[in-house]
Image (cartoon, helix red, strand yellow):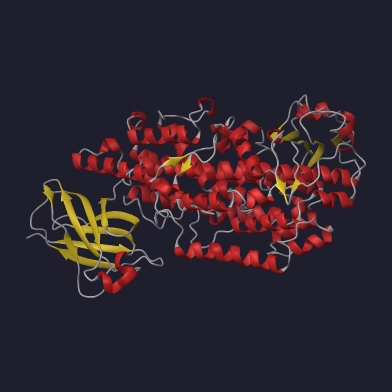
Amino acid sequence: MAKYRVRVSTGEGFGAGTWDKMSVTIVGTQGETPPLRLDHLGIEFTAGAEEDFEVKPPQDVGQVLLLRVHKAPPALPLLLGPLAADAWFCRWFQLTPPRGAPLRFPCYQWLEGAGTLVLREGAAKVSWADHHHKLQQQRQEEIQARQEMYSWKTYNPGWPHCLDEETVKDLDLNIKYSVAKNANFYLRGGSAFAELKIKGLLDRKGSWKSLSEMKRVFSFRKTPATEYVFEHWQEDTFFASQFLNGLNPVLIRRCHRLPENFPVTNAMVAPVLGPGTSLQAELERGSLFLVDHGILSGVRTNVINGRPQFSAAPMTLLYQRPGPGPLLPLAIQLSQTPRPDSPIFLPSDDKWDWLLAKTWVRNAEFSVHEALTHLLQAHLLPEVFTLATLRQLPHCHPLFKLLIPHTWYTLHINTLARELLIAPKQVVDRSTGLGIGGFSELIQRNMEQLNYSVLCLPEDIRARGVEDIPGYYYRDDGMQIWGAVECFVSEIISIYYPSDISVRDDNELQAWVWEIFSKGFLGRESSGLPSSLETREALVQYVTMVIFNCSAKHSAVSAGQFDSCAWVPNLPPSMQLPPPTSKGQARPEGFIATLPPVNASCDVIITLWLLSKEPGDRRPLGTYPDEHFTEEAPRQSIAAFQSRLAQISQDIRARNQGLALPYTYLDPPLIENSVSI
């Protein structure tokens, strides 16, 4: 009678072990065994354990194809009470047949309650590479089961579709925060809430009394970056630099011709441009840049504490001085329509006029960033990528193995967002100037114009004409990371796809791409997002886009939220008075009265502090503790990818030593693999 050795690895996390009983069925080309019990004296399947078992099938099943894992409650469940059907996190099985090399079966899944899970040997395979009918049937059944478990729903009309969490009972443990991460998340939020509650700030519905009083909140969880913001927020150079390296570094674009609705004249900007040049000369030279928040025009606004809030749709003209000179603001118009009651504000204006105009721009930055750059592009679209991956790619697919680390916890954090942030009476609804209605309207507008090139960093940089503007660290670091990801993805694709035809013939891949196009971009062909992929080159770009947006892009637009907003005037979430309609009227007391009320300011600060820091259980970019790939070639590519990221980090840290405000948001060890906070 043949003997098989079975080695089982249990995860190390809290609750990973189980008291349940395990057995396996070995499925081969010549049949399958009955369930074979994995049992020996003592306790099995404890957290962190690797255990060996010996099983003796009654017959030869031929070449091993599959391993069925059976989980059942212990013989005396009543004695164990709630432990009778506990979950188990299995890392992998290893099966050593009587003759031949050991076979590794990656799992890296929670098994809840009693049931059966089918595992495949770890070699990644595309659908056309599976020639045995049992393997073809297995991958079809797996996809069908996951499509039944993870369903789509429409959260708001015009938004990307999202997970229908009603179909996933109490959130499947495989997509849910770990116990430690969940505990840290709520403890951090609770401690921040308690601190500001004790200070009496969360219940104050009135305006701030002064900027000096606002320092009471500024003392909340200081960081070097928040202190720098506090010291420099009124300076023109810092105001301009935030379009390059701040929270929303994706709007600035080169301007060779002024928009007709932004009638800036040479006389207006001459004091900043200096002698020997002109507005037209600088336009032709390519040294002028535009930030246009026009998407905010006419957007609905919120009511906070019974008071209506206000919004503006500003246009900001910026000038890059020759040589190493700083980027400077030249002119600001707070509406999209030039008229007497919408003047163009200039650096030469009265101090408070100019500061108020800049603060309105910063409020527009908050709205566009939080609704579009952050919520839509860095959360809702990664959720689409995640769901499509779970629904269309089986575990054995090379793209599943490549992408699953970049979907870690995304469905959980987005479900929390729909419960705690963008639901009625939650943070967005009660404390931001646009509220849920304005956010929804912005997302609907942006979805009508969002295109593929915006999601592909090299194309986005070229389209905005910002390839050579100095001091643009988001671009510099992002391009390095994009290149490292692209190289890694290209190596993986070349292993499993020998030709363009092999890409076209992968039905699972094409179904994945189609689902992202139809559910994420709502089938809008004008988006430029592919509905199918025809070449390896197109596949490499597409997968690079997915990984970059689920990791580096999210970090760049999320990790600095608290840094930018802790000092409220630098990034006010709402404005209580309408935009100024003339110059010479601004005063310090009017500036303070325009800023958000105390309770709303604190509500947003707590939220952004919580959302700027990973609550433990971190997995930095390129870190893959779950070893889904078992072959040597992809493992070598992973090691090379990690080496490239290490060099990028070294370069970034060397540069940052010479910066007054280091740019850290794209330092690889600080980038999470996935959208998990």
**What residue is shown at x 76% (from left), y 30% (from top)?**
336
Q: Nearer the viewer, residue 513 or 499?
A: 513
Q: Is residue 119 above or below residue 250?
A: below
**Location of residue 622 in the rendering, given as x and y in whole percent from the top left corner:** 47, 52
In the rendered image, which quarter contains the N terminus? bottom left
Q: Quadrant of residue 345?
A: top right
**Location of residue 582 in the rendering, given as x and y in whole percent from the top left corner:** 89, 37
**What residue is shown at x 90% (from left), y 40% (from top)?**
348
**Location of residue 180 in the rendering, given as x and y in whole percent from the top left corner:** 48, 65
Q: Nearer the viewer, residue 283 or 674?
A: 674
Q: Count how many numbered circles sit on residues in the image.
A: 0
Q: Is residue 393 left or right of residue 377?
A: left
Residue at the outermost top position: 260
Q: Is residue 574 left or right of residue 169?
A: right
Q: Nearer the viewer, residue 144 or 89?
A: 144
**What residue is shown at x 87% (from left), y 41% (from top)?**
347
**What residue is shown at x 84% (from left), y 46% (from top)?**
355
Question: From this viewpoint, is residue 249 visible?
Answer: no
**Location of residue 241 in the rendering, given as x and y in whole percent from the top left corner:** 73, 46
Q: Quadrant of residue 300?
A: top right
Question: From this viewpoint, is residue 90 visible?
Answer: yes
Q: Is residue 423 left or right of residue 323?
A: left
Q: Is residue 165 left or right of residue 218?
A: left
In the rendered image, which quarter contains the C terminus? bottom right
Q: Is residue 515 above or below residue 426?
A: above
